[in-house]
Image (cartoon, rainbow, N blue to C red):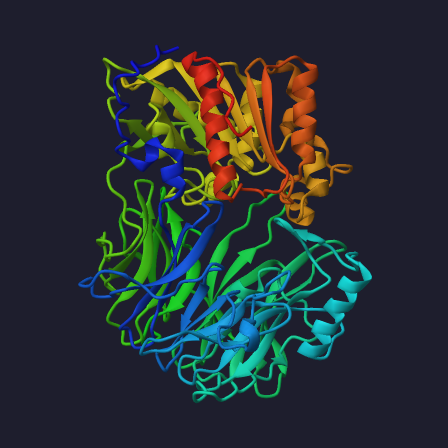
Amino acid sequence: MSEPSDESTPAPESTSPFDDLRAFVALPRVAGLALSLDGSRLAVSVQTLDAEGTKWQSALWEVDPAGQQPARRLTRSAPGESAPVWAPDGSLLFTSARPDPGARGGSGPGDGAEDPKPALWSLPAGGGEARPVLTHPGGVGGVAVAADTGDVVVVASAMPGVADAEADAARRKQRKEAGVSAILHEAYPVRYWDHDLGPAAPHLFWAGRLPAEPAAGAEPEPVALRDLTPDARPPKGAGESVALSPDGRVLARIETVPDGPAGERDRLVVVETASGTARVLVDDPLADVHSPRFSPDGSALVCVRETLPTFEEPPDFTLLHVDVAGGAAHDLTAGFDRWPSAPQFSADGTAVYFLADDDGRHALFRVPVDGGAPVRLTTDGAYSDLQVARDGSALYALRSAYDEPPAPVRLDPEATGQHPEPLPNPGTLGGLPGTLHEVEATAADGSRVQSWLVLPEGASAQSPVPLLLWIHGGPLMSWNSWSWRWCPWLMAARGYAVLLPNPALSQGFGQDFVRRGWGEWGEAPYTDLMAAVDAAEQRPEVDASRTAAMGGSFGGYMANWVATQTDRFRAIVTHASLWHVDSFIGTTDAAYYWEKEWGDPLQQPKRYEQNSPHRFADAIRTPVLVIHGDRDYRVPIGEALRLWYDLQKRGVPSKFLYFPDENHWVLTPGNAQVWYETVLAFLAEHVLGDEWQRPELL
């Protein structure tokens, strides 16, 4: 334990936000990108702390696509603004629960209501005040705009059996006044991530052309909404699975249909917006179909086909090019051993751009529509929010890496080997408290295991530092991009080296690499992790005698598994973790998905018996910090309660950090700060040998 400092000597001022958790949570965070249809304007969403410092609020900023002008803020309100999309007339549409300043008595969407709902707002092209243009009793959750005509479709939550918005509002009022919160379910599932499903469900409403701004003193023209999905079962993430043709005549949407007694899958449906007539375009009993996008002329769609996993095989992904009129489809990425996502047509419709994990990066690719192999356009980094300029002159995206937070960039539509500089934006950081390195290890079966290693400032052979193994979630993902929630630089600022491995089951290394761990989470994924740690400990900058392991979700499962298989680590931190695999699969929000991999526990118990950490609880010798949120429906709280009890009754040194109102990730600023304070204190006690310091607010 260090000696107290001399009171006459002032403490050095923090030189980095990573030294101070309060400063870290206050950093602006760029997320979301929208390109105007003429290519002259970019809008981004930026999250910052509110005045009280208790929650993040989002505002819209404009970024210069040419990179010449500084970013400027476009919106300000306490509820914040999100989901920006440009209309053909240059106005910027967005959703917000902000009050309507023009409403009588100062009330409006989100003002004076107990549960304010977001409305659709429009910011004029020439500047000025934003105005609300569309409301719904269930709130507006997303918007799609026809690029040529400006026709609008919105996503809004509607009560079952109601005919219009007025009836929807009346039904909600009746339930509230009667004190009814009950939900009657007639199909599985009943929950999703952190919220209950029902009784309202997302619907798609046709709004057509939005009315022009009324003259001064005139009442705004109401928008009549027409339900395009009155009898459909929209997917839980309906806003992410909608596309509108450039002429507004056809809506592409994803529809969820039953798959077995308690399962579901998604198919692609197109709707004639004028009549509401729907027809199924792609319906594959062996796959989910999602992420549809129209070609520039509206004659074709590109979408992702994701094969349904089985007991023997993990999922696989490919891109389908589909003729809208006849439904003929062909595979654009046959033989491509990566998982494509987020497809977008090129400006002339002759190619498709997409993103895919590839060797610890999330890269941008281009594939010709008429045949040919995908070509990777970017080198390092992870890309998202891809936007294609309609004149074909450029691409825009958010780019991040483990040493760079998300920032908007401009890319060439065809060049390879690109590593663009960020456009001026409000989310730029200064220096980091260390350096990022790419490292490799060889697994027990000879496979290559790629990892990222963060080394803190001052780490050397003369001053080796403790090592923290941080295991990613998923499991079908990889460490490849910046994370505000799981940020290794906070650990580096306190002197830890952080190892971020991509073991078996990680995507971006080929189908066989995923297959190595399928249904055997305690085998190759575990031995890959240990091989990565062995290699890291050989570095002279690392002190192999002071190590810890941690992870969340699947990473939490692996942290639990590590605790039952070895005592090489001084501490284990397990967040939102699986402990009893049978119990987890029966209570998670999507049991049918996981049972495809693990099998029915009554009919195929072997995988459960071999891979469930709880069966090896007697072997745990390492101190464990358990963390869980009660609103986590993906990994329900029962997993943590069972793990905590099993640790306590065996006398394992352990602590339980419980969040009654947080979900899978812990998202509010105060709780995120306490999360890190507790983790760092636990690691300091067991890895550094410091005295336990209970966080002040706990």
In the image, residue 297 lies at what x, y percent?
A: 40, 82
523 versus 308 height, above or below: above
Query: Foreground residue, 696 or 151?
Result: 696
294 versus 492 height, above or below: below
Place residue 113 in its image quadrant: bottom right
Query: Foreground residue, 430 or 644?
Result: 430
Horizontal placement of 293 versus 194: left or right?
A: left
- Quarter the N terminus occupies: top left
Horizontal placement of 624 versus 588: left or right?
A: left
- Quarter the C terminus occupies: top right
**How many numbered marks appear?**
0
Residue displayed at 33% across by 75% down: 127
In the image, residue 253 lies at what x, y percent?
A: 56, 71
- Looking at the image, can residue 58 be seen? yes
Give the residue furthest to the left: 68
In the image, residue 139 lies at what x, y percent?
A: 59, 67
- Looking at the image, can residue 352 be seen? no
In the image, residue 181 lies at what x, y percent?
A: 77, 57
Horizontal placement of 188 versus 134: left or right?
A: right
459 versus 103 height, above or below: above
Residue displayed at 37% across by 44% down: 482
